[in-house]
Amino acid sequence: MSFADDALSRDAFLGGRMWLYQPKTGYRSGLDPVLLAAAVPVKPGESVLDLGCGAGAAALCLLARAPSARAVGLEIQPAYHALALMNAAGNPFDFEPVLGDVADGARALMGRNFDHVIANPPFYRAGAHTRADDPGRQMALGEELPLAEWIATAAKRLKPRGYLHMIQRPDRLPDMLAGCAGRLGALELLPIAPREGRAPELVILRARKDGRAAFRLHAPLVLHLEDRSLGNGKNYRPDIAAVQRDAAPLPWPKG
């Protein structure tokens, strides 16, 4: 499978700091990879691995914020790997998409280790959602590989003291925490809620290889202001709007 030129759109992210070719129909990147990339405390010259990178949205958003970093993306679907190669060529960053499988421990990257690993795995357990007609969207949303194996591969590819950041639905927290046990420590969880008083709809896990700090559950990060008159997509809090528009870092709680 491959995408015809007329089946693709070219979309601006981060106020035009990064451009992404992606399918007009099927799986399309939205806010999730932007938030994930903005959560990573990457330093100049550090290396990042994006597991299941798709067309490269999260890795390229991260590089748009930290252009001196280096990123590798691992993608199992040849059509999306080809898109990631196209997007790597179309943006002025050090991004290397690799065709490979998270399930085999990222064998395609054997011997390579990274300061950071990021991942936006499928949100739904196998059989827990209506199957999508588009195969790329189905693979992006429906789990075929347990989260514990994603985390095991991340731990294997991290350098000592390296960080994993993973974005998921809150109902997958038990799977994420179980996957980290014995592999990663210093766990932090940042719930993300659409509005004040609403239940979180996403959570970002931060975990560290060889980390020993106590577990931390942060207060929810709220995305939207209460002023609904601004219209959908226009009432983000100023710091969240800066993440989307200006490539600002995510306001991760300090301490």
Image (cartoon, helix red, strand yellow):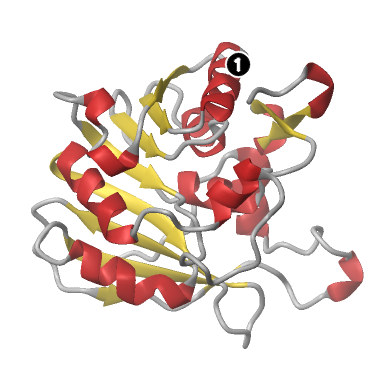
Q: Nearer the viewer, residue 102 or 174?
A: 102
- 219 vs 240, left or right, is left
Position of 45 with respect to 228 (left or right) is left
Dot 1 alpha-carbon crowd within 10 angstroms: few under 14, some 14 to 19, many 20 or more: some
The residue that label 1 is drawn on is 86
Q: Residue at x 31, y 51 (%)?
A: 150
Tell whether 225 sits left or right of 168: right
Q: Is residue 255 visible?
A: no
Number of dots carrying numbers:
1
Q: Quadrant of residue 74?
A: top left
Tell me the quadrant of the picture where the C terminus can be found: bottom left
Residue 163 visible, this orientation: yes
Tag 1: residue type?
Met
Q: Position of residue 8 (x, y in %)?
A: 77, 27
Q: Give 108 or 117, whichever is nearer the viewer.
A: 108
Give the camera-side residue of 168 and 105.
Answer: 105
Where is residue 31 drawn, in percent x and y?
63, 52
Q: Nearer the viewer, residue 206 or 227?
A: 206
The quadrant of the rendering that contains the N terminus is top right
Q: Residue at x 58, y 26 (%)?
A: 79
The residue shown at (58%, 39%) is 247
Which quadrant holds residue 219? bottom left
